[in-house]
Image (spheres, rainbow, N blue to C red):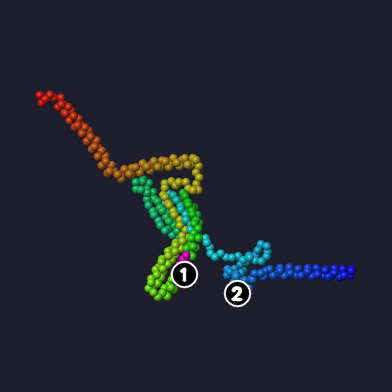
Amino acid sequence: MKRYVKVFALIAALALMLCACGGSKQAGNSGTRQSDVLPSANTAMDNGFSGMPDTIVQEQKSGSLAPQKDGGSTCIVLPSIHDNTKVIYTAGFRLQTTEFEKTQTLIQNMVADCGGYIESANVYNDSIYKSSAYKNAEYTVRVPAEKYDSFISGVSENCHVISLSQNAQDVGEQYFNTEQRLQTLNNKHERLEALLKEASTMNDIIQLETALSDCEYEINRLQTTLNRYDSLIGFSTVTISLQEVARPDSGIDEQPGFFERLGRSFSEGLERFTEGAGDLAIWLSGHILTLVVIIAIIIVLIKIRPAARIRKRAAAKKTAANATIPPEEK
């Protein structure tokens, strides 16, 4: 029995050793085969593997691979299909100046330096009845989007800015939706042209030509929309209101103290009084003939009314006197 027990123990020990060796070999094999679960880019292309997107294959071919945080196999960085950022930048300035022509030239030079252009300009004077008759100007400026920030900074640094408003509108979703609809219509237009070539009856030809006309109209409309988006995105729009003044108001960066504001308020009140008196004198000189006629009419009315009263009183006295005389005397 002892001999059988020893033999059995020896066989069991050998079996345990074999199982341990087999487990370690399988673990080693699994570690080396784990990277072979997904085929590489070259293997996928060589074997005609169709489950891998073209973008992934291109990224692997170019070596644009990023390591994982755990140090294992690499993860693939997918490129974006397109940049959805389509931003329209707009801004509005309100400027004041005591040197109108100089500021005008400065603005025109800044627009030219950044490669932009003035879309519209309107220069005008105040009413002729104002003694000051200051000049004003309204500009609509288009500047390249990449020069938008530098242009805003240039105007802010070189001009007296009273107010500044800015806006950024992302129209990427509308832009690409319009682009996709345009592509769909172009495909539809090609199919309609192919059907028109194969049409044999007059009714089919008329219907296809009508559909083609409607399709072309919609294509032109969408293309115009895209062109307008491209113009607004490529060239930012800046509106500038320039006003000539005798004394500029406080700018957006100025914070005057109490006594400075008090003195400025008194000075502005005196200027307004002086300008008001001058405006009144100019208005009177412009309406002098009308005033003379009105004054003459008033004088005539004043002189006519007392004479009418005198005649009325005399008639009343005469009537009263006639009433008191006896009939025999009459």
Q: Which of 162/314 is in front?
A: 314
Span of residues in magenta: 181-185
Give the left or right position of residue 90, taking residue 6 as reference: left
Element under label 1? helix
Q: Position of residue 121 (x, y in %)?
A: 40, 56
Query: Is residue 301 placed above or below 251 in the rendered structure?
Result: above
Residue 247's spot in the image, x, y percent? 43, 46
Horizontal placement of 92 versus 317: left or right?
A: right
Lateral position of residue 24 relative to residue 248, left or right: right
Whether residue 27 is visible here, answered yes or no, is yes
Quarter of the figure with residue 17: bottom right
Q: Is residue 78 magenta?
A: no
Mark 1 crowdedness (10 Å alpha carbons): few <14, some 14-19, many ≥20: few
Residue at (41% x, 40% y) in the render: 270
Residue visible at 47% across and 54% down in the picture: 91
Callout 2, which amino acid?
A: Gly
Q: Which residue was labeled with disc 2?
A: 48
Q: Earlier in the sequence, mark 1 or mark 2?
A: 2
Dot 1 corresponds to which residue? 187
Answer above or below: position of 325 versus 306: above
* Residue 323, numbered label: none
Task: Reply above or below: 218 against 314.
Answer: below
* Disc 2 secondary structure class: loop
Quarter of the image for residue 199 reads bottom left
Q: Residue furthest front?
A: 1
